[in-house]
Image: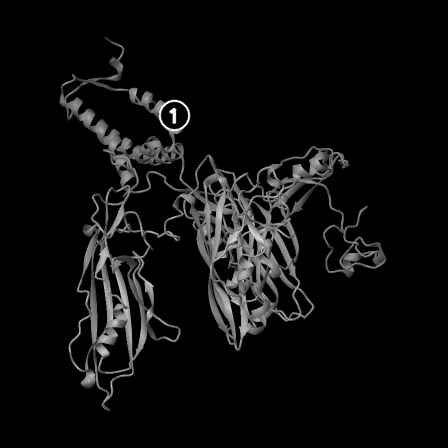
């Protein structure tokens, strides 16, 4: 008929240990304090990656075709060519080599998210009865904008070049307009460094339209767009009276963009790392302190819990 | 369905168009493999993931749709009509608002807005095209400086920019020289000066006729004509000299021609066009200004200078001709900072003088003995010139009938270094030497020496710069006593990259430190 005894409630009791300022216990506690908080910082720092210096984000750029085209088509194996661009000054320079094609352009927003997803570009070049098409050089200009972190605005291009010893009827190109970053973009602010035209259409001089100049200046930029994986298809067998056709599908895919994180982002990731190591140190040194003071390794005056309210 | 979007041929049945009444099918799904999108009723419904909804109490019809991997709960009627239609109230477009709507939504078009007609200020500015005036027609044109277009062919309409002195060259294709000789304007000198004048200023004064400059002609100018199997006096080089005087415009224009006689067999000719702009104040001086190779230090890519007969001239190395043979005349300039290599095949003419002939070929007509230490060479300052070590081609006085040692390659080694302040380094040549490599030329056994010897000539520039501090150099950086990386964000933020952010950081760090 024994009464069943069980633990109904428990709470930790607080034991205080008192000592003077100039004692070993004070020194011990100071050392423990330093050992608890400083080594985690050193461990976290020495194990690399303490400061997050580079990070990435994903964004689909807002790309628009600028309706600027420069085309050079080789029409013989001896170097004859015909050319056309949307720049009046360039066309004025070309004289009898100018051949105006029929151009069809359509940009599509396939998922209705307000950002264009691809450009369908078609160019039908009338070719004379004695001419054949052996090579194509084509520059298409785009405006390229990013908004998520820093507002990055640039005017960029896609360069298509193909040559074949067999005269062609059609060139089909289907590729992605990818961002090529040689340096990280800012985490905020407005970046209009490269908001300059790829081809200076206002210049009346021939050197402004020289492909080596255009490519040379463009490639010296730190951020460019390139036509990636264009997989050109060269179709042969053109009828004498048929035009030469360039068919290009250029997609505007989402990009992974690198950027240096801002101050608070860096501090946040450093804090997360520091505290997770600090917790282990706090636990370990708490055990050590309890052992030292409970067993009176260092002499102190313990104040037991039941005496606490007595003077 | 009131509208059948796939019914594109009225009066005929569209394949896979399940709503086409022309097909006369009671159950189109049985005949067609699939129904095109839009040919079946599309329910207007709003869906959420099924697991999010426990119980539905909406008065509308609902359904549970099994998608590929998720189950969707859909409500069939929406009361937010504005979200599901493009235009709730169609906009009316008339002549009054067409322009504003087009401007509001327009992104870009093939008509580039910035390409208006060329507008000029009152006087010529650097880079403006130089205008010409045709007296007979009263038309304005631009002074052309033909340049190479695509494929190197001449683009005649390329204008010459005011003050932009320079030469351009391009290829003129001649399918039939004799036919083109008389009627090709490009080969005729008259094209480049007759019937037009150069405008003094862009918008000339008060009179209607613009102020003009006739082109001054050289004294000896022969017309070009056919003679025998040759087309005589074709333009090879056209040089304009334009004297200007600040904003009062062009004062004087003269033209010079270099002519060539073209044989019937020639298919193309390279023409050079040069326009030199000279200030009136300097008119009396040399007609074509000399360019320095740097001032004072050498510029990379500028010719390395030597002193030949009290004249500053570039150092040259041999170059191969079109057929691979050597020539004493055709040599190429040594460019500062560029390691170079060239070679050619020497066809032996006489064995006796083989060594000296090869040496002449390697050295050129006048062999350099000194190098200018700076790009701005001054012949009077002897301390600016350094003697080349071993400049002479070593020759043994021996008859080469029975085999001898012939120099086959020469290497010019140039030691250079940057001098002056770090922020403005100047390249200085410290010294140079010639190294000759020999080859034993064997008698081939028949009492003859070899018919061909391959000669090479190389140049190497050796950078001996001693830097006062380790890299990176030249950029201003913070001399931080703290270990830079350990306090990276704080130092990066306060070192002027982000002034505004630094202030916010300090305003937070200071109270933290006070605690």
Figure label count: 1
Q: Decide which of A194, B318 is in the foreground and name it.
A: B318
Side (left or right) of B83 relative to B252: right
| Residue A242 picture location, percent across and down | 68, 67
| Residue B345 picture location, percent across and down | 32, 76
- Above or below, B175 against B277 in this view is below
Q: Decide which of B207, B439 is in the foreground and name it.
A: B207
- The image quadrant of residue A26 is top left
- Which residue lies at the image location 44% right of the left edge and 37% below the top edge? A187
Q: Which residue was labeled with disc 1?
A: B504
Visible residue check, residue B506: yes
Side (left or right) of B493 relative to A61: left
| Residue B418 picture location, percent across and down | 24, 48
- The image quadrant of residue A258 is top left
Side (left or right) of A218 relative to B353: right
Q: Circle 1 marks a residue in which chain? A: B
- Above or below, B306 against A75 in this view is above
| Residue B283 picture location, percent across and down | 40, 47
């Amino acid at each position: 008929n024994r009464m069943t005894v069980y633990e109904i409630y428990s709470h930790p009791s607080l034991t205080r240990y008192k000592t003077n300022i100039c004692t070993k216990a004070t020194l011990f506690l100071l050392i423990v304090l330093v050992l608890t908080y400083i080594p985690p910082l050193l461990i976290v720092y020495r194990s690399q990656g303490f400061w997050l210096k580079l990070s990435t984000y994903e964004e689909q750029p807002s790309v628009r075709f600028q309706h600027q085209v420069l085309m050079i088509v080789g029409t013989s194996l001896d170097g004859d060519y015909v050319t056309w661009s949307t720049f009046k000054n360039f066309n004025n320079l070309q004289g009898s080599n100018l051949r105006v094609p029929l151009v069809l352009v359509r940009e599509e927003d396939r998922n209705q998210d307000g950002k264009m997803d691809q450009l369908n570009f078609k160019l039908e070049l009338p070719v004379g009865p004695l001419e054949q098409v052996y090579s194509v050089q084509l520059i298409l200009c785009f405006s390229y904008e990013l908004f998520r972190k820093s507002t990055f605005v640039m005017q960029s291009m896609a360069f298509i070049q193909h040559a074949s010893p067999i005269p062609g009827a059609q060139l089909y190109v289907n590729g992605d307009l990818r961002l090529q970053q040689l340096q990280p973009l800012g985490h905020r602010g407005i970046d209009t460094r490269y908001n300059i035209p790829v081809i200076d259409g206002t210049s009346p001089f021939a050197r402004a339209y020289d492909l080596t100049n255009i490519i040379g200046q463009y490639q010296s930029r730190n951020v460019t767009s390139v036509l990636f994986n264009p997989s050109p298809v060269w179709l042969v067998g053109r009828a004498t009276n048929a035009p030469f056709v360039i068919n290009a599908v250029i997609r505007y895919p989402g990009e992974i963009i690198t950027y240096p994180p801002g101050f608070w982002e860096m501090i946040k990731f450093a804090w997360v790392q520091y505290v997770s190591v600090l917790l282990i140190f706090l636990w370990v040194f708490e055990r050590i302190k309890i052992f030292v003071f409970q067993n009176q390794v260092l002499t102190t005056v313990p104040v037991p819990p039941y005496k606490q309210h007595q003077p | 369905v009131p509208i059948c979007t796939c019914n594109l041929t009225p009066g005929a049945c569209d394949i896979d168009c399940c709503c086409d009444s022309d097909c006369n099918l009671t159950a189109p799904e049985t005949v067609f493999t699939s129904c095109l999108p839009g040919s079946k009723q599309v329910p207007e419904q709003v869906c959420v993931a099924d697991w999010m909804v426990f119980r539905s109490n909406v008065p509308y019809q609902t359904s549970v749709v099994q998608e590929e991997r998720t189950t969707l709960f859909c409500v069939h009627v929406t009361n937010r009509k504005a979200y599901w239609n493009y235009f709730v109230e169609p906009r009316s477009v008339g002549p009054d608002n067409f322009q504003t709507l087009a401007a509001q939504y327009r992104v870009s078009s093939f008509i580039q807005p910035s390409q208006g007609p060329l507008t000029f200020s009152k006087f010529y500015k650097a880079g403006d095209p130089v205008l010409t005036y045709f007296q007979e027609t009263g038309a304005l044109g631009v002074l052309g400086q033909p340049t190479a277009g695509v494929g190197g062919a001449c683009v005649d309409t390329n204008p010459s920019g005011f003050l932009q002195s320079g030469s351009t060259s391009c290829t003129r294709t001649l399918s039939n020289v004799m036919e083109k000789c008389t009627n090709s304007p490009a080969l005729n000198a008259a094209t480049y000066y007759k019937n037009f004048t150069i405008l003094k200023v862009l918008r000339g004064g008060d009179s209607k006729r613009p102020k003009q400059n006739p082109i001054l002609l050289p004294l000896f100018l022969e017309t070009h004509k056919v003679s025998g199997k040759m087309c005589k006096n074709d333009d090879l080089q056209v040089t304009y000299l334009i004297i200007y005087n600040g904003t009062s415009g062009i004062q004087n224009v003269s033209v010079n021609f270099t002519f060539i006689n073209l044989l019937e067999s020639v298919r193309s000719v390279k023409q050079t066009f040069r326009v030199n702009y000279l200030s009136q104040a300097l008119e009396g001086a040399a007609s074509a200004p000399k360019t320095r190779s740097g001032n004072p230090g050498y510029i990379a890519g500028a010719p390395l200078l030597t002193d030949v007969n009290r004249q500053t001239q570039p150092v040259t190395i041999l170059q191969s001709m079109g057929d691979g043979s050597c020539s004493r005349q055709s040599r190429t300039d040594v460019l500062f900072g560029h390691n170079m290599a060239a070679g050619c095949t020497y066809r032996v003419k006489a064995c006796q003088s083989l060594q000296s002939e090869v040496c002449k070929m390697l050295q050129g007509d006048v062999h350099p003995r000194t190098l200018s230490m700076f790009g701005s060479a001054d012949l009077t300052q002897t301390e600016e010139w350094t003697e080349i070590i071993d400049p002479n081609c070593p020759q043994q006085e021996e008859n080469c009938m029975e085999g001898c040692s012939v120099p086959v390659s020469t290497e010019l080694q140039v030691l250079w270094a940057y001098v002056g302040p770090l922020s403005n380094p100047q390249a200085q040549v410290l010294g140079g030497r010639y190294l000759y490599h020999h080859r034993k030329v064997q008698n081939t056994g028949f009492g003859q020496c070899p018919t061909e010897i391959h000669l090479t000539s190389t140049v190497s520039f050796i950078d001996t710069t001693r830097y006062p501090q380790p890299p990176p150099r030249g950029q201003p950086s913070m001399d931080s006593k703290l270990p830079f990386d350990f306090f990276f964000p704080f130092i990066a933020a306060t070192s002027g990259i982000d002034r505004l952010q630094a202030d916010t950081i300090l305003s937070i760090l200071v109270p933290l430190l006070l605690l």
